Image (cartoon, rainbow, N blue to C red):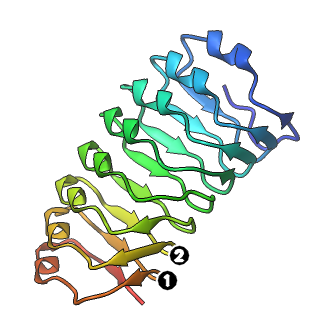
Amino acid sequence: MDLSQNYLSGEVSTQLGSLRPLEVLELSSNNIMGPVPGFIGRLSILTNLYLLNNKISGFIPREVGMLKSFKYMFLQNNRITGCIPSSIGNMSSLMTLQLSNNNLIGSIPVEIGMLESLRELDLSDNYLSGSITTTLGNLSTLAFLHFYGDQLSGHIPEEVGGMRSLLHFELPENNLTGSIPETIRRLGNLTVLFLT
């Protein structure tokens, strides 16, 4: 279902929760408000969710962890608040997680390190704090990692050396301290390293 780039407003209709065969829900670039609907957890074969460029608010529902076939989640450029739910670690097929330019708070959940199929992770331009979780080192297929413009602190963990497929590693405009870990030399495919 593709209804992107229209003038749709209001909340995402709960009636969409009855569309069990739905694989792709594309509602980006509208004027949709309200929360990310919890009913998406019932759409068991949903693989792609595009809600970017709207006015979505509220929390990311923990029900997203029920989406075992999910591959692409695009929620950037909204007004989403709260923490990233730990249940996100159950989305074993997830390849892209795009949450940039929202109002997310709290720390990066350690459960993100369970997403072994992840290729792109963008949490930029939020209010995320705390340290960079060491479990990111488990993401050997990750190619793009963007954390710029958050409030992350502490040092860059040595475990980042485990992200052997990494092409872009961007961490500017945070509160990171310490030295660059020597393990970064293991990132033989790295083409962009942005730490300023």
Q: Could you say whether the residue bearing mark 1 is in a helix, strand or loop?
A: loop
Q: Can residue 96 be seen in this view?
A: yes
Give the side of residue 20 with respect to residue 9, left or right: left
Residue named by callout 2:
149
Disc 1 crowd rating (10 Å Cα; few below 14, some 14-19, many 20+) is some
Q: Distance between the residues labelled 1 and 2?
A: 5 Å
Where, by quadrant of the figure, is residue 45 drawn? top left
Q: In which quarter of the image is the C terminus?
A: bottom left
User: Disc 1 or 2, which lies upstream in sequence?
Assistant: 2
Q: In which quarter of the image is the N terminus?
A: top right
As rendered, which of 108 and 159 lies closer to the eye? 108
The reply to whether the C-beta atoms of the residues labelled 1 and 2 are less than 8 Å apart is: yes
Disc 2 crowd rating (10 Å Cα; few below 14, some 14-19, many 20+) is many
Tell me what residue is drawn at x 45 percent, y 80 percent: 174
Tell me what residue is drawn at x 71 percent, y 52 percent: 53
Residue named by callout 1:
173
As rendered, which of 33 and 108 lies closer to the eye? 108
- Residue 179 spot, x, y in % from top left: 22, 90
- Residue type indicated by callout 2: Gly
Give the side of residue 82 with respect to residue 16, left or right: left
- Residue type indicated by callout 1: Glu
- Residue 79 spot, x, y in % from top left: 70, 53
Q: Above or below — where is 164 with respect to 2?
A: below
- Residue 108 spot, x, y in % from top left: 39, 57
Q: Above or below — where is 42 with respect to 146?
A: above
